[in-house]
């Protein structure tokens, strides 16, 4: 069965997924804010949000691509786009040890429909320093890193002038903002998968037939793969002008694997996309399926 999967991201949320190394744990980290606390000898970089202490040991600090860069890699983490819409921070005091901090979410599908997600922090330093994760000073609400300068200044590397082919540029993807409720739930594995099925085809009863397929014929298979109880909470139809040639599946930020699982089971080709905020979907809906003309 052929799948057409279109990814955004996320900066989403969203999010913890079941099954697989990055998603086997029903927990993860959510970044809400960054704060730099200068000190006379030791300064501290704190990341605010929601964190799982048992996963602190997986965080790594490594050299960047240049002498002035240091990378902090936080697995099982993502960014709350609602509270942190910016990805670059450079408003630090003059003469400070950090020139800029860049954040990047890395969410990708791996073999076996497994999904890994992490956050990279790229620190552009003004001087050499020792950076360490202070586990004893970290809590479920903040990560604390100590910054101890060596006193040696780092000269910024000259920027390279690159020629950009405007015609071949990929258009920017739509940003995904997390509702606070979904932001809180994004890194925790729920116990129930709420699915809404809507008929977007001219075939009468398309939504009902798909609901029967999912709930009665494929329920056990779906629940074993996603690790949640399947519930079809809505069966309805769309307006005639919204008829789709191909079935489309929308998912909440933490429900990518569930959407991929459903797409694998539903006959025909599907398009899988993150759920836009302006759809007005009920907050209790995790996955929304629009049954297209190609569903038999």
Image (cartoon, rainbow, N blue to C red):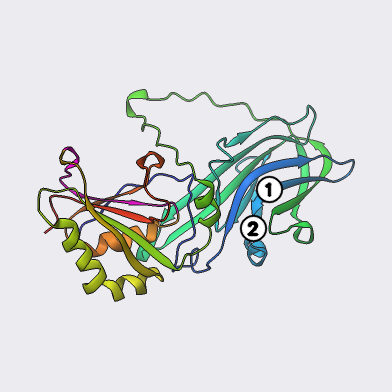
Above or below, comparing residue 70 to residue 267 in the picture = above
Residue pointed to by mark 1:
47
Magenta residues span: 241-253
Residue pointed to by mark 2:
51
From the viewer's perspective, tell me whether residue 292 is left or right of residue 81: left
- Quarter of the image with the C terminus is bottom left
The crowding category of the residue bearing disc 2, from other C-alpha atoms within 10 Å (few below 14, some 14 to 19, many at least 20), is many
Above or below, comparing residue 205 to residue 69 in the picture = below
Residue situated in front as seen by the camera: 253 or 71: 253
Above or below, comparing residue 209 to residue 129 in the picture = below
Image position, residue 219 (x, y; %): 28, 72
Residue situated in front as seen by the camera: 174 or 236: 236
Quarter of image, res 68: top right
Q: CA distance from mark 1 to mark 2?
A: 10 Å
Quarter of image, res 129: top right
Callout 1 secondary element: strand
* Residues under numbered marks 1 and 2 in contact, where contact means CB atoms less than 8 Å apart: yes
Q: Residue at x 52, y 57 (%)?
A: 185
């Amino acid at each position: 069965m052929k799948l057409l999967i279109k990814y955004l991201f996320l900066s989403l949320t969203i999010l913890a997924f079941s099954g697989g190394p990055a998603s086997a744990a029903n927990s993860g980290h959510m970044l809400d804010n960054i704060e730099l606390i200068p000190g006379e000898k030791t300064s501290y970089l704190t990341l605010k949000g929601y964190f799982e202490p048992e996963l602190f040991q997986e965080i790594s600090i490594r050299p960047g691509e240049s002498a002035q860069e240091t990378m902090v890699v936080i697995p099982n983490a993502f960014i709350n786009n609602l509270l942190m819409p910016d990805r670059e921070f450079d408003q630090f005091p003059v003469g400070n040890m950090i020139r800029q901090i860049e954040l990047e979410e890395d969410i990708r599908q791996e073999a076996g429909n497994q999904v890994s997600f992490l956050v990279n922090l790229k620190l552009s330093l003004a001087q050499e320093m020792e950076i360490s994760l202070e586990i004893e000073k970290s809590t479920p609400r903040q990560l604390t890193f100590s910054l101890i300068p060596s006193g040696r200044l780092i000269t910024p590397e000259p920027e390279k002038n690159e020629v950009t082919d405007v015609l071949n540029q990929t258009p920017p993807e739509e940003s995904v903002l997390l509702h606070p409720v979904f932001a809180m739930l994004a890194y925790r594995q729920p116990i129930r998968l709420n699915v809404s099925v809507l008929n977007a085809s001219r075939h009468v009863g398309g939504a009902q037939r798909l609901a029967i397929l999912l709930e009665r014929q494929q329920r056990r298979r779906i629940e074993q793969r996603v690790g949640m109880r399947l519930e079809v909470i809505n069966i309805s139809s769309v307006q005639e002008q919204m008829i789709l040639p191909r079935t489309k599946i929308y998912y909440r930020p933490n429900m990518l694997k569930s959407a991929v699982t459903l797409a694998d089971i539903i006959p025909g080709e599907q398009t899988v996309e993150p759920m836009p905020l302006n759809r007005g979907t009920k907050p209790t809906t995790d996955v929304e399926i629009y049954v297209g003309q190609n569903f038999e």
